[in-house]
Image (cartoon, coloured by chain):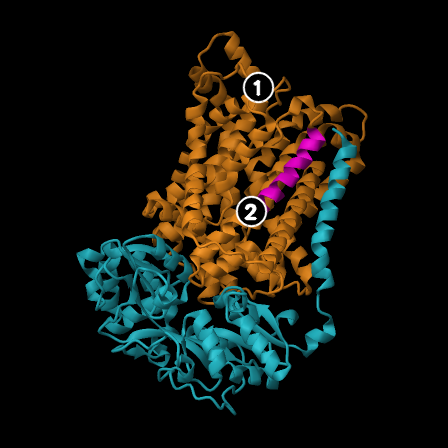
Amino acid sequence: MNYKVFLSYIVFIIITLVILFLPYLLLDPNQQDQAKALRVMSYSSFINQWGAGPEVARLFEQKTGIPIQWINAGNAGLIIERLKFKRETDLPDIVVGLDQFAIFEARRHFKWLNVRKGLSSRPDLLPKGARFHDFLAYDWGALTFVYREGELPAPTSLDSLLDEQFKKKLIFQDPRISSPGLQFLLWVLGAKGEEEGLRYLEKLKPSILSIAPSWSASYNLFKMERPSIVFSYFTSPYYHKQDQTSYQGAVFDIPHPIQVEYAGIPDFCINCDMAKKFAHFLLEPDVQKIIMEKNYMFPVVSDAMTGSDFVLPKNVKYTAPIENLSLIKKKRELVNHWKRVFF
Amino acid sequence: MEKSFLLRACLALSLLLCLAFPVLHILFYVPFTSLTWDPFLSPVLLGATVQALLSSVLTLLLGFLGALGLAQNQVIMTPGRFRVLVFALILPSFLPPLLIVSLIVGFFGFVPMGLAGVIFFHVFMNVGLVSVLMASTLVNDMTRALRESQVMAIGNWKTVGEVILPLIRIDLALLFFYLFVLFFFSFSIPLLVGGSLFGGIEVFIYEKILLYGQWSEAVQYSIILFLTLFFLSQFFKSTSRPMDMSQPLSAMTLQGMGRRILIFFPLLPTFLLLAGLLWSAVTIKWEFAGLELLKSARGTLTVGLIVSSGVFVFLSLLSFSFLNQFLSQVLLSFINPGWVLVGFSFLLLGLSGKLANLLLLGVALTLAYVPFLFRLSFSRQLQQIESQVRFAQSFPVSWRRIFLRVIWPQTLAPICFLSGLAGLWACGDFAMSEIILGSNEIRTLAMDIKVLLSTYRLEKALLLLYPLLIVSFIVFFIFQGLAYVSCRNISSRSWTL
């Protein structure tokens, strides 16, 4: 073995690594800059370059002069778990991206400041029963089955999903690890009652093509697998505006579940006033428009929809989070029922 | 000798403690509560066992046939071309499962579902890697037996059945164990195409954290599974087989076994994947992502190289310590307590700064991959040179000399291959990266792909697959290059894997 050549090669690898490290070392902001910044914790797809975060941060800094320092919590479902460990470098001034399931957990573990105090914008588009004093809703979406026109007929009720034409066509998410999946379970059980709902899920089995681990997995499978229909958002078709195929959200005869995203300020915030400014900033029409177009969700302020393609679906009724409170509280029991059906 | 033995024992124990660090560390933070037995564990275990068993057997069978073809191809191909062939074969084993499923569905318009779907994708993703590893065993260790068979004019297939299979039964058993563990804890594929029954153990643990915030339950179930696996691994104890020191397989040996047909099995997934990539290249709208893309590519290259280097150092230290049978068995059966637990354990170290986070991610991924790589082939590599080491120890020479002259020259090539492989896996990781990096300033291509997939943009995600492949290719070949430049003078070990 040629140890000289070996050592030269190792030196080459080390130099390559040092060169790769340099930009991270040189561009690391100093502690003073970090102390001035507002620390915002959110999930990765919000703060990534394709999400609304960077543009919102730029506008906020332009308007107030306050820079944003993002804390990436990764998966939205893990935000609370991350907060629980109270790692010093992770402690945010404000948390953006909690859904209605997460805020019940959030209240159990932390105290949250009244974020609505002094709010000037009125969330006039937000369905009733989705407003709370300690969390500020900044976008929402109604869930339904999305289909491609001409491929399959639009389902109009939960029972219509049992039809032969939907055999092995349904894609939805696993309620154990996906928020929309849990929404689907609560939707069925809320509409049909627990016992009847579980019997319905049993009957639904032949119609299922896939129970996906996440919304993204289910939606990408839907885009590829034809024909199929997927449990997604009424706003999903807006992404396909440029496509030749027309995507539609099915209107059911029962109220549709809604997914609401909230911002909240934990009581351990350091820059609490700045955090409140940021929360209120999220409801400004320009910012709402950015969130709507990047997140493909409905805004909570109607002005944001002016001049855009986004329109609220007609003849659709919504189930507010507050109406599902009793079901949300016993989600463990319900998920166990779900497992009894599908295992 | 006594002093070096103590040093090596301490080193081996330290390395094992390092591997156990994530679970030991998180125990400080998780309050222990009494464990309520979840009745759903039984059906989950049953489903995972059935799919893992069938997937492993089929992967092993097709992988063995592929290895026969690959071994024949190796002796007639130039080393450069052969390395490209090896990369092509292992390509499906490191791409994110969702993208593989999407590419296949996009290309064929359908995807097998249920148990058949799980087995299909498991075999699809791993048959190439298994072929490469088994071909390595055939070429390096079976030569003498094959030559003797040739001299005695025994037919090729009879040689396979009566000579090769009995000789490599232990290698097969260990590889089966590796595959079984890999498939048993498989997360994405069973969930995507398997339905709930085959939805796996990882989800069972992940559910405890994500849905109920029950860290204690998650950790306890992880420990129970580790212990179960430890007892199971006792059936897969490997014994030492002296290494065949004759020249590697010549072009004459194993000739006429249908090398083109046999190599077809492990290459088929790569062809399908390339067809899918070609299809996506034709259908997607190309656009240049510019500086942001370069930033993510730099992040990917950095993470890949850190992990490859970390694995290189770890495996080199393991080969220096030359584990005894018990410690080797512990490492063979070691499983990590799930990605989320490992990720949070490192997160709780409380380090901040980009460089610290990058290094932390590198260490976390290294510790996560090492047990897999050890099971995959490294335990066997160490076993194979055991008799030589024992023989060398009978002479009055220092352990350092034995390591530099006997162990290191023979383990370097496999270490480089496994380090490159770990680098490939690291380039494709987004789960651990998202948890540990914790800021938006360090990004990798895999993280970008995950974000694009979760914001409708599948086409853009497919676009990023190409730079991801290039960066992964670079990482893999940097470490293959290390093996090449260091071992090219060793005539008995021309096989660089």
Q: Please, which chain is the residue tagged with disc 1 on?
A: B
Mark 2 highlights which residue?
Answer: B425
Q: Position of residue A31 (x, y in %)?
A: 73, 72
Query: Is B441 located above or below residue B94 in the figure?
Result: below
Q: Amino acid at mark 2?
A: Trp
Q: Which span is picked out in magenta?
A: B471-487
Whether residue B235 is visible, yes or no, is no
Q: Position of residue B60 (x, y in %)?
A: 44, 33
Q: Residues within 10 Å of mark 1 (few under 14, many from 20)?
A: many
Q: Position of residue B383 (x, y in %)?
A: 62, 30
How far is mark 1 from mark 2, CA to CA? 30 Å
Image quadrant where one finds the C terminus of chain A:
bottom left
In the structure shown, which secondary structural element does the residue marked by tag 1 occupy?
loop
Task: Identify the hue of chain B.
Answer: orange
Which chain can be seen in cyan? A
Residue at the extreme left of the image, as rendered: A164
Q: Position of residue B440 (x, y in %)?
A: 59, 65
Q: Which mark is residue B249?
A: 1
Query: Is B38 located above or below residue B156 in the figure?
Result: below
The picture quadrant where one finds residue A161 is: bottom left
Q: Residue at x 48, y 35 (%)?
A: B128
